């Protein structure tokens, strides 16, 4: 579709974090008439508790696009604002669940970009959960919103390989840019009638529920692959953690690891300290590359070790 034809299509964009900014920019630069942005309200942050706008809010102001950032999506004024934008199409990237009064307002409805190959990994944390579960492939999907979570009719999808040592942060960035391209393609194809929505084939046992603190604790009794996937699947946020009792009791977040070998060891867990922190598990040896001790910045494990007295490191559930 040419820029001139795209300009005839009025789009309302809905999103919050950095992940969504790439799609907003892509639609704008492709020539679509983005008539308004719906996002979350500023939050008080920092020592001075100054109001801080989310990434999408900042991007929209930079592009001179009108912004609606309500405290409640069910406020009548919000519905009136969305309706006044007279949009042909709504586009959602990384936003909260919307009421029908909002996602149903655009003439052609609203589609969402989701970071998985639906119906797999419906939910709040599809990137993290896919890596934590050891998947070697995932993808991105655009689908029409309905009153259920991530269950609308599919418009487009694209597969993405997950590398052996890839972290959630690295996969996030890859998906962010590929997703922006897919959003433009979906908008092109949907408004022109080239793509027809198709129902999701079935439910899936692979889900992506929100991650809570206890989900991030490392269980050293698990297999080497499960531990490696756990660490990289939670990196850089929220971070996998363990508690160590030697040389002193403290909490440490682990961000990057490397499998050294897959040799069967005895049943005990041994933490080896020389110039690196390696852990002998029941089915191999893993090295911890990047860490963040509680109250300190993220650093290379070797830098952290240099400040510790020599001795074995003991973790919370294997002392």
Image (cartoon, rainbow, N blue to C red):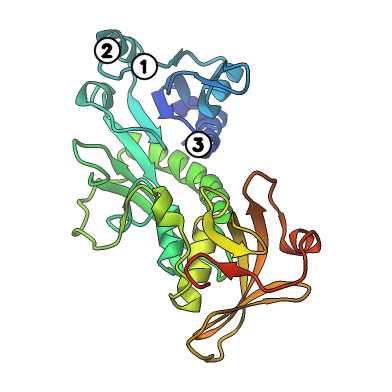
State whether residue 115 appears in this view: no
Residue 244 point in image, percent of width and height = 58, 62
For the residues labelled 3 and 1, the Cα–Cα distance comes to: 23 Å
SS type, badge 3: helix
Between label 3 and label 1, give the one nearer the viewer. 1
Residue 23 point in image, percent of width and height = 50, 36
Residue denoted by label 3:
23
Q: Residues within 10 Å of mark 3 (few under 14, many from 20)?
A: many
* Residue 233 in the image: above or below residue 196: below
Seen at 48% across and 13% down, the residue is 66
Instruction: Return the mark for residue 71.
Output: 1
Q: Are marks 2 and 3 in contact (CB under 8 Å)?
A: no
Instruction: Return the mark for residue 317.
Output: none
Residue 237 point in image, percent of width and height = 53, 48
Seen at 60% across and 56% down, the residue is 252
Is 250 on the left or on the right of 70, as rendered? right
Seen at 63% across and 72% down, the residue is 258
For the residues labelled 2 and 3, the Cα–Cα distance comes to: 26 Å
Q: Are marks 1 and 2 in contact (CB under 8 Å)?
A: yes
* Residue 318 in the image: above or below residue 195: below
Is 94 on the left or on the right of 29, as rendered? left
Residue denoted by label 2:
75
Does label 2 or label 3 sit earlier along the sequence?
Answer: 3
Is 39 on the left or on the right of 250, as rendered? left
């Amino acid at each position: 579709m040419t820029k001139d034809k795209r300009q005839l299509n009025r789009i309302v964009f809905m999103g919050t974090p950095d992940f969504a900014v790439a799609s907003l920019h892509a639609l704008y630069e492709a020539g679509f008439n983005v008539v308004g942005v719906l996002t979350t309200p500023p939050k008080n942050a920092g020592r001075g508790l100054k109001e801080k706008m989310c990434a999408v809010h900042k991007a929209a102001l930079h592009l001179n696009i009108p912004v609606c950032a309500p405290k409640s999506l069910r406020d009548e004024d919000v519905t009136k604002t969305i309706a006044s934008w007279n949009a042909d199409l709504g586009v959602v990237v990384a936003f909260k669940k919307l009421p029908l009064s909002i996602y149903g307002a655009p003439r052609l409805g609203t589609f969402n970009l989701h970071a998985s190959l639906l119906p797999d990994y419906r939910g709040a944390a599809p990137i993290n959960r896919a890596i934590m579960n050891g998947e070697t492939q995932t993808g991105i999907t655009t689908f029409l919103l309905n009153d259920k979570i991530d269950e609308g009719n599919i418009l487009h999808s694209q597969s993405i390989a997950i590398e052996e040592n890839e972290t959630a942060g690295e996969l996030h960035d890859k998906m962010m840019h590929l997703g922006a391209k897919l959003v433009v393609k979906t908008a092109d194809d949907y408004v022109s009638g080239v793509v027809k929505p198709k129902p999701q084939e079935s439910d899936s046992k692979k889900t992506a529920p929100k991650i809570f603190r206890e989900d991030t604790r490392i269980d050293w009794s698990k297999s080497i692959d499960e531990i490696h996937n756990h660490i990289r699947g939670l990196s850089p946020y929220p971070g996998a953690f363990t508690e160590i009792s030697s040389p002193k009791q403290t909490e440490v977040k682990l961000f990057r690891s490397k499998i050294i070998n897959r040799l069967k060891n005895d049943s005990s867990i041994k933490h080896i300290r020389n110039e690196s922190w390696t852990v002998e598990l029941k089915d191999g040896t893993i090295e911890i590359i990047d860490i963040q001790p509680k109250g300190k910045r993220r650093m290379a494990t070797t830098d952290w070790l240099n400040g510790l007295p020599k001795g074995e490191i003991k973790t919370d559930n294997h002392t």
